[in-house]
């Protein structure tokens, strides 16, 4: 084995149970490809430290990636593993996403000890979320509910539900499945009626752009279908240029060279929304074609939702 191939790669991750599971998924994937030299390095992010207010009030999703990216740029780690829905579309100069693992189920799950579906919650029930998208979508579907801030990891949120502090909540199916907590899902929300966060369910590996060794090793794990759909979804988000206070949902699928995408932007209180969709065959370069279509859709939608983008 050459000196380059024997170099240990330091894999940076948040310390939450879910983040560690995702880091182990990457390590196991690389081991299955014949590369076992991975050391997991746990870093605490601002998003993990701030638990008393919403991320939108604290600086947005980048709070879960900032410290990992700084460690990459400082060469304290060689890889960073992210939930892609937490990764801002504009990646810092000098960094790149080298691989996307096959996407897990992108749906939201309804969880409650009091009702089988969101629609069956009693009037005035307490619903918990920290997501501006879920807040707007729940307010649209059930304006009678009391929507309160809910932060913390999956176990913390479920414990608060079981303690009776909340009557219902939504969590990503992907995270629950990866944690082995699918048994807590009361019902699944159909994506035809309830769009998830852009890039929900996808895990990405970030590297230094100049690190050809890390790129060569990790690119073996890249899933083309996931790359195509995320290129569309993230380009849609980039074109809208929404802040962390903007309620945006969307989902792309790619099968038999056909891309399907549905997206929406909602008023923060759920009182109004604008939606868009497409179905199109992709050309010989599906990655770039999907990105172009997502960007075009976002740019076309932007003038109609500008009042909700600058909040």
Image (cartoon, rainbow, N blue to C red):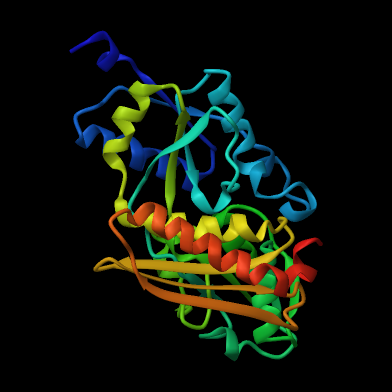
User: Residue drawn 60% across and 47% down?
Assistant: 88
Q: Residue furthest front?
A: 283
Q: Is residue 201 visible?
A: no
Q: Is residue 32 left or right of residue 174?
A: left
Viewer-nearest residue: 158 or 201? 201
Viewer-nearest residue: 115 or 244? 244
Give the percent coordinates (x, y) of residue 47: 67, 44
Quadrant holding the C terminus: bottom right
User: Residue drawn 52% across and 18% down?
Assistant: 75
User: Residue drawn 73% across and 45% down?
Assistant: 50
Give the percent coordinates (x, y) of residue 141: 65, 86
Give the percent coordinates (x, y) of residue 98: 40, 37
Q: Is residue 89 left or right of residue 63?
A: left
Give the percent coordinates (x, y) of residue 279: 40, 76
Q: How many marks?
A: 0
Viewer-nearest residue: 266 or 285? 285
């Amino acid at each position: 084995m050459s000196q380059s191939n024997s170099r240990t790669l330091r894999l940076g991750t948040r310390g939450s149970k879910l983040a560690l599971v995702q880091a182990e998924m990457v390590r196991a994937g690389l081991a299955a490809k014949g590369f076992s030299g991975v050391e997991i390095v746990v870093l605490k992010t601002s998003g993990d430290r701030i638990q008393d207010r919403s991320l939108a009030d604290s600086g947005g999703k980048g709070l879960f990636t900032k410290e990992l990216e700084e460690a990459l740029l400082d060469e304290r780690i060689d890889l960073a593993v992210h939930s892609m829905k937490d990764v801002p579309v504009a990646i810092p100069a000098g960094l790149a996403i080298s691989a996307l693992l096959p996407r897990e189920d992108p749906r939201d799950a309804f969880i409650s000890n009091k009702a089988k579906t969101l629609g069956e919650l009693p009037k005035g029930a307490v619903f918990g979320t920290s997501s501006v998208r879920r807040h707007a979508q729940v307010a649209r579907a059930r304006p009678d509910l009391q929507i309160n801030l809910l932060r913390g990891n999956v176990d913390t949120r479920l414990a608060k539900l079981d303690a009776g502090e909340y009557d219902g909540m939504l969590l990503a199916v992907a995270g629950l499945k990866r944690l082995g907590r699918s048994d807590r899902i009361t019902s699944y929300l159909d994506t035809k009626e309830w769009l998830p966060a852009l890039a929900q369910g996808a895990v990405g590996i970030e590297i230094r752009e100049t690190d050809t060794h890390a790129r060569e090793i990790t690119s073996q794990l890249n899933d083309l279908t996931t790359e195509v759909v995320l290129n569309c979804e993230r380009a849609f988000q980039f074109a809208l240029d929404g802040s962390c206070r903007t309620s945006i949902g969307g989902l792309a699928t790619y099968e038999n060279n056909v891309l399907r995408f549905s997206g929406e932007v909602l008023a923060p209180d759920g009182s109004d929304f604008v939606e868009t969709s497409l179905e199109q065959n992709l050309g010989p370069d599906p990655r770039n074609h999907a990105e172009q279509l997502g960007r075009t859709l976002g740019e076309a939608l932007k003038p109609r939702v500008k009042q909700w983008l600058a909040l």
